Image: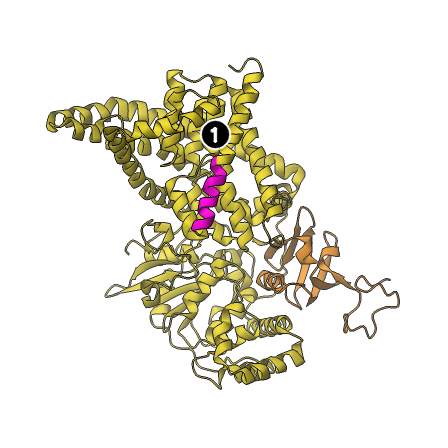
Chain colours: A yellow, B orange
Amino acid sequence: MKTGLNYAPPAMSHTAGLLPAAAAPVPTDVAAARWLLVGAPNVGKSALFGRLTGAYTTVSNYPGTSVEVTVGVHDLGDETVDVVDTPGMYGFLAVSEEERVARRAILEGSGQTLIQVADASHLDRALPLTLQLLALGRPLVLACNLLDEARRRGVAPDLALLSERLGVPVVGTVATTGEGVAALAEAAHGAPVPVDGWALPQPFADVVALLSERQEGVRLLDAELALCGDPEMAPARSAASPRLWLAATSMRDARWGAADGFAVALATARRRMALALLDGVVPDAPPERRARRAALDRVLLSPWTGIPLVLAVLYLGFYRFVGHFGAGTLVDLIERVAFDRWLTPPVTAGVNALVPWAVLRDLLVGPYGLFTLGVRYAVAIVLPIVGTFFLVFALLEDCGYLPRLALLLDRGLKRLGLSGRAVIPLVLGFGCNTMATLVTRTLETRRERVIVTLLLALAIPCSAQLGVVLGILSVYPAAVAVWAGVLLAVFVVVGALAARLLPGDPPSFYLELPPLRVPLVRNVLLKTLTRVRWYFAEILPLFLLASVILWAGELTGALRAATHAIEPAVRLIGLPDAAAPAFLYGFFRRDFGAAGLYEMARSGVLGPAALTTAAVTITLFVPCVAQFLVMRRERGTALAVTVLVVATGVAFATGGLVGWLLRSVGGWA
Amino acid sequence: MKCTMCGTASGCDGCPIAGDFYLPATLASLAAGEKATVRRLAAAKGGDLRKLLALGLLPGVELEVERRWPAMVVRMGFATVALDAQLAEGVIVSRAA
């Protein structure tokens, strides 16, 4: 078992792969891998992947969390096999960008063994995809995962019978405990190419064959998708002579009206085949509903009880745990005790003794030193806050709360041009905006992705920034309220404006609700760890880079010049010149800027009004370098720059307004 | 009883929409607790149709509406899905007797 290796985003190298995902070719390590895990969202693909490879992708009880294709290695003893985990897909007719990623990984590969992961309780929903995969003529194994849940419900399938009927190995697994994983690996290792005989039912076969059989290189599946009206299947269409295409579509339209009718009829026919295959495989258990879970769901989903519950979760989970415990207690402990008392003195003394050049000493332990600024900020201030945030997020994710939150907030988000699905990137943004910008891929239209990207860059503070800002403002509870109120107002106004101004149809909301599950400690911890590791690998280099740039700027005087340049803007919103450096730092990391303010608040340079103004401005202010780079890659340079300009304008305008209002109200100076 | 699709009060015999079943309704018009069978998908946009297919709302599927607000929650076997009223308008069902 070796560590997995993510390609492009989650590893998130900023230097490579700055192309939009849709245009990028399938990476060679994915194309060359031998096992490909595929299946619907939220059936445990990533958890099984983790069991097979020892690597852990972020697995969660939320449909659509593996946005990327992940590669890992399975150890067979005498040899190793590359394994690929793909995002969830309901079928080959893709709706979202992540489904397209999965589809391309399957269609553009050749010869890999496909391991379809299915929820053992809903085989009727999984088998239509199985039938399509069988048509590809590649080795296939069906993993009936979540078998423990199916057993509890009394619907555990007869695996041997199903295997006999399908002609491929069928293995029962429980990814959370590891049950059946060894058997799955063994089955995948020796999986044969399935025998033919899984042709489309008539009358579909004739129409599809017309496109596929008369020309080279067009598979049945390509032809089928083209006839279903899939715009990405243009190759199958253009490979056909105009006359052939006309003949096929005429046949289709005469019988089914149009592409949509054809798609529905075909899906219905496949479902019938699936049900016939399952006859006798799955016991007839009436799906009784557990009363307690149903009651809990009612409480979570009814706005009357659900909204207060959201507020309670926000308060306890984020304000108390992340804000107070993480940003307060833990930061104090690590910074004041670990760094100030134990680490910094010996490191400083050591550097002073060993390095004779003052300039180099400054680079290491000076005011902007690699150690004193870069490492200390990253480890002492940011790590505890981000770590506690991801812990809470993983907990909410694992128990299945997030999809319910999406449902609850759908109506409100519709007014901002978004659907309930946008909840995930938005909430994740409170952890790390960069990661959240990446996750906007799970949204369906470009319009939604643009709106969420803008809101993330502008009005959602990341956890590091949030922690530091709350830390600064906690002295003045009223200031926290003003700050939160202003951010919410900006969020709503900008969202509503974007919804009006951006062209496109309003989004529609659809989501599978996984059952509520008791979170597994192992899952939650591993998920937190994976995200923290990702985050840390991402920020430490940036912190170090920022240290070097600031150090060089100080050395050459460029820093002072740049600080002077933004002083007028800082003065404009009523802040002292001393606050200017904090804004400059904000370019490197959003929390870096806030951390600069933290120092000033401690030393008492800023009063409550100035502090609130500064906190509002710096929260709204430009995204950090990493977020900007991901924005550019995902949405294009023009949009990323536009967001940057808009964010700066809105930040200073709002900051100025808030500052002016606070100063005119008594008792705030 | 009046047809919810076309408004005719004369029943659905020979109706081209209804086919061989009675009283077609849209999923959006069902009340919480009602059971029905999906008969036809009539989404206006191709994109909406694919979402319905992804949710598994196919002709022949039996379902039960769990709640309508703030969005429709529909149970099919052991799977539960949520969709907004606009998408649910595109699912033609027949109520269980």
Residue A79 drawn at (x, y percent):
25, 66
Residue A620 drawn at (x, y percent):
48, 34
Residue A283 drawn at (x, y percent):
58, 66
Q: Nearer the viewer, residue A529 or A651?
A: A651
Res A537 visible: yes
Residue A553 drawn at (x, y percent):
27, 32
Q: Quadrant of residue A49?
A: bottom left
The type of residue carrying mark 1 is Thr
Residue A461 within the magenta-colored segment of the rendering: no
Furthest toward the right, the residue is B10
Q: Is residue A595 above or below residue A300?
A: above
The residue tagged 1 is A617
> Relative to A199, is A541 on the left or the right?
left
> Relative to A502, is A651 on the left or the right?
left
Residue A642 within the magenta-colored segment of the rendering: yes
Q: Nearer the viewer, residue A121 or A616?
A: A616
> Relative to A24, is A545 on the left or the right?
left
Q: Which range of residues does the magenta coloring cover?
A: A637-648
Q: Nearer the viewer, residue A223 or A651?
A: A651
Q: Is residue B85 above or below residue A455?
A: below
